[in-house]
Amino acid sequence: MKLKILGCSGGIGGALRTTSFLLDHDILIDAGTGVMDLTVAELQRIDHVFITHSHLDHIAGIPFLVDTVGGMRDKPITLHATEETLNILKRHIFNWLIWPDFNLIPTSDKPFMAYAPFSVGETITFGGRKITPLPANHVVPAVGFRLDSGRNSLVFSGDTTTNDALWAEVNRIENLSHLIIETAFSNKELDLAVAAKHLVPSLLVEELRKLKKPARIYVTHLKPGETELIMSEIERDAAEFEPRMLENNQVIEF
């Protein structure tokens, strides 16, 4: 399996793009503003979008994706998320007020977009590829994902704060090779991070100490303007884990 990072920033500006990863050529893991750098031909090949949660920086590309290529495809683009997240999208995005309901366009029998609810712990399989939602702890219903190629597994935390339930699941993964975990704010903004249910470097260190499996660790979702400060604090406090900053256009094979 190959994961291309289309966006991994906590904001926009210049080359910064919000969270979106392209798995092989046909699956998106979240669909933030990074999706908008794909060509029309690349967009047309996307069959599935797996959504961690409903916040705009993770779903902004979905309405444009479906609107752009829905009529070019012979099957709908399927949105995979928890029932709670799909209901938020139905009520607040695809409601004819913000965006058309592409689950009914051009007809309810042959829509451009379909919904597929999942539950935490339920594994969805495409050929030899397995995607399993993992628990997250955020201000809205949220999940992370385990992506399992059979040979190796990559875990993406999604947006989360301290989360013992995640580590209980991760520590059961025998073929874990990569961990992508968020750290949105610097230590000086601990109170904001706690209120918004994100991590700061000091909390990240506490979380990584719960990890019992070896893995290459990447940090994502850093807020613009604080990137250097956040990474300097992480490199100082979490050096034992050798964390690296996730970068746009990076490709991870596993």
Image (tube, rainbow, N blue to C red):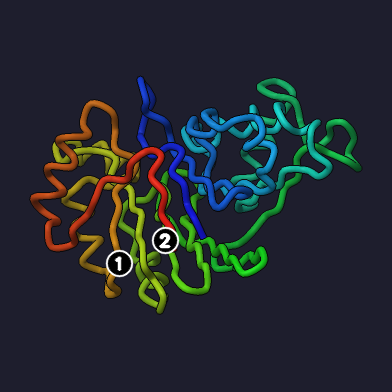
Camera-nearest residue between 160 and 1: 1
Q: Is residue 84 visible?
A: no
Residue type (three-letter) at the residue carrying disc 1: Ala
Q: Which residue is mark 2?
A: 155
Rate crowding at label 1 as few (under 14), some (14 to 19) or many (20 or more) other CA atoms within 10 Å. Answer: some
Q: Quadrant of the C terminus?
A: bottom left
Residue 76 versus residue 169 in the image, above or below: above
> Residue 160: which disc?
none
For marks 2 and 1, the one nearer the N-term is 2
Q: Is residue 76 left or right of residue 168?
A: right
CB under 8 Å between callouts 2 and 1?
Answer: yes
Query: x and y percent of residue 10 in the render?
Result: 35, 34
Camera-nearest residue between 22 and 219: 22
- Residue at image coords 81%, 31%: 71
Residue 10 versus residue 75 in the image, above or below: above
Residue 107 versus residue 151 in the image, above or below: above
- Residue at image coords 64%, 59%: 118
> SS at mark 1?
loop
Query: x and y percent of residue 83 in the render?
Result: 65, 51
Q: Nearer the viewer, mark 2 or mark 1?
A: 1
- Residue at image coords 57%, 46%: 28
Rate crowding at label 2 as few (under 14), some (14 to 19) or many (20 or more) other CA atoms within 10 Å. Answer: many
Residue 239 versus residue 76 in the image, above or below: below
Query: x and y percent of residue 165 in the render?
Result: 39, 66
Report how far apart the C-alphas of labels 2 and 1 lie in the structure.
10 Å
> SS at mark 2?
strand
Q: Which residue is mark 1?
A: 215
- Residue at image coords 20%, 60%: 206
Residue type (three-letter) at the residue carrying disc 2: Val
Camera-nearest residue between 59 and 129: 129
Q: Is residue 93 left or right of residue 193?
A: right
